[in-house]
Image (tube, grey):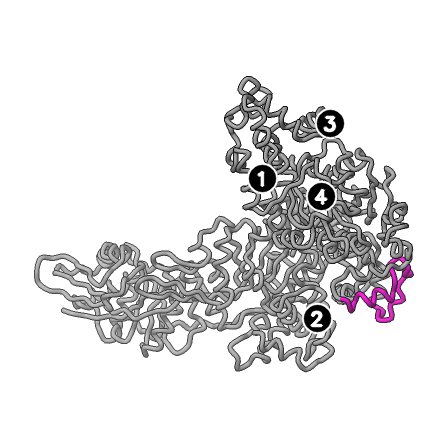
Amino acid sequence: MFFRLDSFALLGVDALKVSIEVHLSRGLPGLMMVGLPGPAVNESRQRVRSAILNCGYDFPVKKIIINLSPADLRKEGSFYDLPIALALLAASGQLKTGLAEDSCFIGELSLDGCINPVGGIISMAQKAKSLNKKYFFVPEKIAGQLNFFRGLNIIPCSNLAHTVEILNGDKKIGDYILHGEFKGPGRKRKYIIDFSEVKGQLKAKRGLEIAAAGMHNILLVGPPGSGKSMLARRMVTIMPEMTLEECVEVTKIYSLYENHLRGLMMERPFRNPHHTISRAGLIGGGMNPKPGDISLAHRGILFLDELSQFRSCLIEDLRQPLEDKRVIITRNQHSYCFPCNFILVAATNPCYCGYYGDRGKKCTCSLREIQKFWKNFSGPVMDRIDMKVAVARLKEVDFVEDVSGECSASIRQRTRAAVSTQKKRYAGMNIRYNSEANVGIVNDWIKKDSELKKLVMFAGKKCMLTARGMAGIIRVSRTIADIEGHPGIRQEDLLEALQFRTGNGIYE
Amino acid sequence: MRHCSSGQGMVFMNDTMQYGGIPYLLYYLFIKKISQVKVMDLLRMHNNDLSRTLEYLNKISGHENEKLFPDSGSNTDTKNNPVIEPEAIMSFLNEKNIKVITIGDAVYPYILKQIYAPPPVLFYMGNLELINNFCIAVVGSRKCTSYGREAARYIAGGLSENGITVVSGMALGIDSEAHMSALEGKGKTIAVMGCGMDRVYPPENRDLFSDIIDRGLVLSEFFPGTPPYKNNFPQRNRVISGLCMGVVMVEAGNRSGASITCELALKQDRDVFAVPGNIFSQHSMGCHSLIKRGAKLVDKTDDIIEEFSYIFKKSSLSGTGEAGKAPKELGDIGESSATAKQDNMKGAPHEEKPEGDGPELNSTEKKVMDSLGYRPVSLERLVRETGLHPVKVMQALSALELKDRVRVCGTDCYCLMDNME
């Protein structure tokens, strides 16, 4: 009267095998669950009992012990319902055990036996494949996430009775294997917003294009109403498409956050947290750690609007993730690692009143207030922002003028080309984009061209740039050269990059 | 009250005149809080004899006359006044390394005595000899443009090279620039503070403060410990203008502390000079309104010096003063002597042809230059006017900026470099 089934636990984005053991013995009827079940797991006994009864099976009138092994790992979540129910049925002789032993299961049960979606199935499928399992039973509604997955038979199942029938051989398992066709991230994308809607702002638009092509962090500084948020929101539309690998990475994180994902995430995420966001909300955390906004923005954009309003400790918290491209959250039992390789797009006013340097309105801040305003921004974080762009308010003339800018699709062609150039350049290295190039690589770029080197030195002195600031400018000019299709950085590229330096119309 | 009871007669008076009476004068001014004007009136009443004045004050400061003193008996301001007894004052000042001169001292500047209500005492640190030099005040607003900074360096540096001492208020912006460049020259600099000498305000100027103490002079009429209350500053400004024969306003908006200084200078019968700026700039409005009212427009140091030719002709300074057109010192304002030499070769900026011959400009850069003026324009407008691709315009702008032809002014706006060829 014993049966064992395999399922999974989630540790951050990684899955871990968990065995569900059921033992039925004689004694006072009752159900006991051991192996550190969390509240949601403990409640599953009620769902399982109702689901079994409502599907027309018998709930064993025995002393039932359920063990979740490894027993010292705390189990959270509602996705053990299906494996527990199946193990109970198998132990009580209502389910044939042959197929079940080669399979693993995940799913939350409704009281009527329907199977509800859960998070993290891509990580689990990867784990199942490495365990050499044959079948992986997943909730039907979210099976689309695994369309791309090869090397494991995915069985989407909609309710408990259906699953039991398959396992018992009443229905042929071969008929139910997922044969989803996966088209890959498409090139034809439709957005309701487009870059051509932004009038004027030539410099900012070009800046965002460069940032998108080289994954540079960018700061937009401008008075209220200058269109900083409008520009930032449209940046996703000019970023190159994600590769399949990137789609999977992003979906793995998102499925922890959103249970009902029907398929892979194909669009680069755009996260725009309000400045009142908590630390755990931004970085990730909680007793049972969940990804924060920086991880949800992985491979996409983290847009911090009104950067000055964010508590300075939140901005400081970004230092390490910006450098490592991942965040490690340690709790007493385990360390959880969430990737967070995003472009930081920050927008801020130039001072408290918002009009410092504006042409029309006069700034009412004192010099000291302006200095205080800029002191709030952490130096190390500002150092990691390669590009700074001043965004001015449009004049009425510019509004009226009917010159629509370049549309997102044609800008995207350039960024796509620049990204593939970078891919070739960094093949075999553990970086992908120019923004990740370290000082050694940066020096190599300018070493060969003595004229360029001279210009770099001169510009650095003239514009009073720090070494780190200068390296940022060179990285940006490398991306410009990639966009323009130059094999080496030309002087013009560096000159253009200088327009995006610190202190160019922005308070230093 | 124990030192001040009137019954003690001559013994008491001897006490009073220790250190030339300074402790008691300070005691009455800062602890008993008799106003500076009242003290000056009393001095005048006693034919400028400090000892008699103090004797009189001692006499009337008995209990029965308590009402005469704003601070009658209870010392409310002990927080900012660490000493409350005259005997302790001198050791307190010594401890802080702060020295003091009174209006009775010979070294007290004659021209400062001429103003309405000169400060009866001045605290100082640094080289007191500077106080009787020929002084010119260089003032301006805290929020300034790069042009203002440049102009302050140019004017203050030039004055100092000519042996003129530059006086200013050690505020951020124009004041700091003026002090810094003047310190490098012969004339050195005097900073007049708006708070007690034992604190540095603004704190950003910590280094400048100690530099000026080392090589220049820092003055304050406020008792050590006085915080930088905002109404201290206009009061302080009268000392700045009072110490000087003239005041130069470098860059200031319409309502600023610098314009208060200039108003005071006019009342004190000093000469007022103003450095012109861009007519579209908010930051030069104050200077322009001074010029409209008759202040002398200054675009080189000699414009100031020639106003005082009656002083400078016979002195050793006259040589450089008359050299006039291309004074050597103008080039030395910048930090590196190598670039300064080049500037010397070129001569003063004003002698240059306004349109540059620009051998290094390529065609795009020339085109962009043609569309630029002294009035700031946006990148969008430049693109529209030149018909060039925005990327090309941006490249040209960076190149021109590196060649000192163009500067960024305000948010995403460009204009021609004002002061250069």
Of B314 and A14, the residue lying toward us? B314
Q: CA distance from mark 3 to mark 2?
A: 74 Å
Give yes or no for residue B404 being in the magenta stretch.
no
- Secondary element at tag 3: loop
Looking at marks 2 and 4 on the same chain, the residue that comes earlier in the sequence is marked by 4
Of A470 and A126, the residue lying toward us? A470
Q: Residue at (12%, 60%) from the top-left corner?
A: A63
Image quadrant for the C terminus of chain B? Answer: bottom right
Q: CA distance from mark 3 to mark 4?
A: 53 Å
Identified by mark 4, the residue type is Lys
Chain ID, mark 1: B
Q: Which residues are magenta?
A: B337-365
Tell me, yes or no, whether dots 3 and 1 are on the same chain. yes
Report the disc number at residue A494.
Answer: 2
Whether B222 is drawn above or below B12: the answer is below
Q: CA distance from mark 3 to mark 1?
A: 34 Å
